[in-house]
Amino acid sequence: MAAGTAPPSGTRDFLPEDVRRREYVIGIIKRVYEGYGYEPLETPAFENLETLLGKYGDEGNKLIFKILRRGEHEATGQADLALRYDLTVPLARVVAHHQAKLPRLFKRYQIQPVWRADRPAKGRFREFYQCDVDALGSPSPLVEAELCAAISDAMVKLGFSDFTIRLNHRQLLTAVLNSVGIAEELHGSALVAVDKLDKIGPEGVGVEMASRGIAAGAAASLLARFKQTAEGDTTPFQALDPHGTAAYANLASILALADGTSARGRIRLDASLARGLSYYTGAIMEVNVPDLAGSLGGGGRYDNLVGMFSGQQIPACGFSLGLERILVVMTDRGMFPPSLATTPADVMVATFDQSGAPHAVRLAGGLRAAGLRVLVYPDPDKIGKQIKYADGRGIPFVAILGDDELKAGTVTVKDLKAQAQQTYSQADAGAAILEALKRRG
RNA sequence: GUGGGUGUAGCUCAGGGGUAGAGCGCCUGACUGUGGCUCAGGAAGUCGCGGGUUCGAGACCCGUCACCCACCCCA
């Protein structure tokens, strides 16, 4: 066994069947996004390191794939470039840079790979695709509502019926933490613990908070508030500081607007949702399905990010679906349509010896012109072996060009499934095969 | 980063100190212009890598690497 043929850990080769599945999912998502007026954008695989540093939080900084300086500076081991870590920060850079060329309200989608120096696990890779949608230039809660609607549409079109979109707000979270007396510098720690509420339960979160130095009293009253909200009681959100009150009102607007969209009934206010990225400033969202521990995607509002590049604040909000997370669940559940298990060609042209090759190539051209996908078998193998190859690939028809056919200007078309064959003039074969394919459906 | 599991033929895996195995796939033939079924034959492995124990190591011991699972964190 030759060593080292596997791709690097956390990356994958996509074989034809994989690519078809990926393109199927991407196609659905893209059409949904375009239905909301989002426009396509692509950005480079790598960015200047400074562009990315300091945008994702401490954890994120560590996971950035850095590219060493080249040339005479190589020996220093220093990095000046980095593979992009997400699609949001590059978007903010693009908007800051091309501001004059872009519309005041810029709605864009972007489906490209990103890289993280993470440890691979199920549904987690070091190279993976994100399917982002973002709207820049508007602070309106309508933006959040439509993002949730677009995500819901995409999920439904992919065949999901059991997803939920969790919704929370960074400033609401801050206000709640303040209200129970957790010091500002412990907010980050508290959020990490709170984020695990649905995973490890209130007792687990209590233990975790204690280990992070949060007073037992504050932890208890925080948990009590989350318990109330989980039961649908919104009183914990009433007596908050002005920021908290505004944040709660903002979420209420989003929910009200989303109620008139396909996201109706899918959104759940969840005060324990935290999310890792540090650039979020307002509403935060996450899509989940019950049978996957992590999320299928997430997003939120980041009104300060563009300003970090241009100095001019532009309100922005977006959502990102993780392509491989979706693929993992869809594969586990067998959600792909059977039509994806397709064949590379409708017909294969077989010949008996090298002298038949020019005729085979010419016949194939004619068949393609008739609208068929045609594979020409290139080697003068025994006819049985050629047919076996076609059958193994699921190619339904074999066009046989032997001495007899060449002499008569005909071609014998074998229908592998029907185990029948018929001879046509070379001019009529294409139409006959098309007809047979159509009959079959 | 922590804990556990697994590395043997292209693939899935058996073998737990004494000649390297099976199924599937692949190749050849029976069938010299016709696939699936059947039969006969064939190719294919430094048993992840390095060391150790032993007369003898896929097997036992130590180390190491890779992959998988669960944590951590995330899409």
Image (tube, coloured by chain):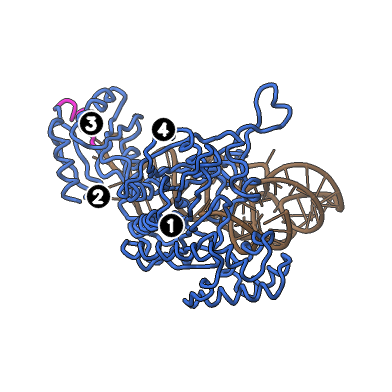
Q: Which residue is mark 3?
A: A401
Q: Nearer the viewer, mark 1 or mark 3?
A: 1
Stretch in magenta? A399-408
User: What subunit carries mark 4?
Assistant: A
- N-term-proximal mark, 4 vs 3: 4
Label disc, if present, on residue A125 of the rendered structure: none
How far apart, in angstroms, are the residues tagged by discs 1 and 3? Answer: 41 Å
Q: Which residue is mark 1?
A: A331
- N-term-proximal mark, 1 vs 3: 1
- Please tell me whether the stretch drawn in magenta is mainly helix, strand or loop: helix
**In magenta segment, residue A403:** yes
Chain painted in brown in the figure: B
- Residue at (22%, 42%) from the top-left corner? A414
Structural crowding at the residue carrying mark 2, measured as other residues with C-alpha within 10 Å and reported as few (<14), some (14–19) or many (≥20): few
How far apart, in angstroms, are the residues tagged by discs 4 and 1? Answer: 44 Å
- Residue at (67%, 60%) from the top-left corner? A184
